[in-house]
Amino acid sequence: MTFLDRSHSVAGPGFSRWLVPPAALCIHLCIGQAYAFSVFNKPLAQLLCSAAQACPPATEKAISTTPGDWSITDVGWIFSLAIVFLGLSAAVFGRWVESAGPRKAMFAAACLFCGGLIVSGLGVMAHNLPLIFLGYGVIGGCGLGIGYISPVSTLIKWFPDRPGLATGTAIMGFGGGALIGAPLAVGLMKYYSSPTSNGVAPTMITMAVIYFVYMIVGALLVRLPADGWRPAGWTPPTAEVAAARMMTTRNVVVGDAVKTPQFWLLWAVLFLNVSAGIGVLGQASLMIQEVLGVSVAAAAGFVGLLSLFNMGGRIFWASTSDTIGRKQTYMIFFALGAVLYALTPSLGHWHAIVLFVLAYGIILSMYGGGFATIPAYLRDMFGTVQVGAIHGVLLTAWSAAGVAGPLILNKLRDYELANGVAKADAYSMTMYIMAGLLVIGFICNWLVRPVADRHYMPTTPTVGGELIA
């Protein structure tokens, strides 16, 4: 197992840094299956009635009236729990990921995420919902968190000239994981289905094996740059450029970073950007059906299109931030996003389908771009020594937003409907509130300033950009 140690994963002469993004993609495309977990919701709520071949039509709160079956609300907590533990595990294990190195962290992520899928499969066999919570939500969620941050610091060290492009490429994989995970799960459930089973349990176990293989490939490919390595022909930005973009050449350790106002401003920036987007992403199909009256098939196409914008925005906006700067990129996110959210109720009333879809596509591209740009923003503010650990702590904002965003949208929609508002208008107030959240985010981002000198660590305890002790 010493092969997994940090010291055994340092690149030798001639190693191409362009092999590192594919290694990161092997991890992120697999753990990105979390975005496709909803394909299991209906089958999980029909485990008993499917065996009896008497499943009634789906409703918003429950699918089956068969005694002992679970409701959609019950199984919906599986994904929410996984996102909560994603943020918590990234925060708790971020420092270990930095010290252990990317190879050991990726291996641990593969064991946890795929082990969680197997435990969930056993929970399905036993019809034990708490066991599924433990498997996918807790164990798998920890694998999500460790896997999500495991390549970030390494990519930033390999691409000091293009950190946004590098992290955006990897994190794009997480956004695109559903494009692989959803059809794979649906196909496997169809293959394993029988008169007495809808195939969920063997599907989860099979996916665990497939994903484990690909995640191990990523762990084998990844390498760390040697001490003092830098890209051929690259020179660090001038002092003027670095100052204009708030790009430090010094380092802050995670314990000191969380004591700075900059960290908490960026926490709020990520929280507000994610809260505004994740609720819409979770209710996109229902929303466009109720606002514009489109068919279920058209709504499914809308969701797929939003996923493409979400994925493409991660690479586009993160790459753009390398040119215009991270703070300026987030200014665009919040200013443009607030305008688009405020316009969407009117676009719905006008039945301007193309503009409505385009507005939400741009919004979701900036939602994804926010995830991909934040690691480079942290690198600019706090340096490279413990950027992965700092990123891990910051991801608790994602956990909080994963609860807050859907809660705001769902509760406001229910309140509006309870007070006699038509379904087509039930989202208007929510969109205005989302616009207000983005205005607050704009202010938080505008307040970000360079870190005070007292928070930086001395330069002597590092070699080749790595912390010695």
Image (cartoon, rainbow, N blue to C red):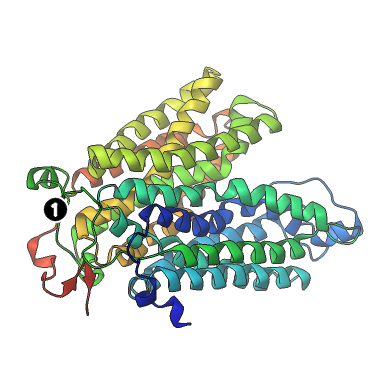
Count the numbered circles shown. Answer: 1
Does residue 440 appear left or right of residue 372 in this picture?
A: left
Q: Residue at x 43, y 55 (%)?
A: 19
* Residue 269 visible from this viewpoint: no
Q: Residue at x 41, y 34 (%)?
A: 432
Q: Name the residue that disc number 1 marks.
A: 450
Direction front: furthest residue? 14
Q: Position of residue 153 (x, y in %)?
A: 33, 62
Q: Quadrant of residue 69?
A: bottom right
Q: Secondary structure at mark 1?
A: loop
Does residue 401 appear left or right of residue 79 in this picture?
A: left
Q: Amino acid at mark 1?
A: Pro
* Residue 402 visible from this viewpoint: yes
Q: Residue at x 70, y 32 (%)?
A: 297
Q: Position of residue 268 (x, y in %)?
A: 31, 52
Q: Residue at x 31, y 57 (%)?
A: 158
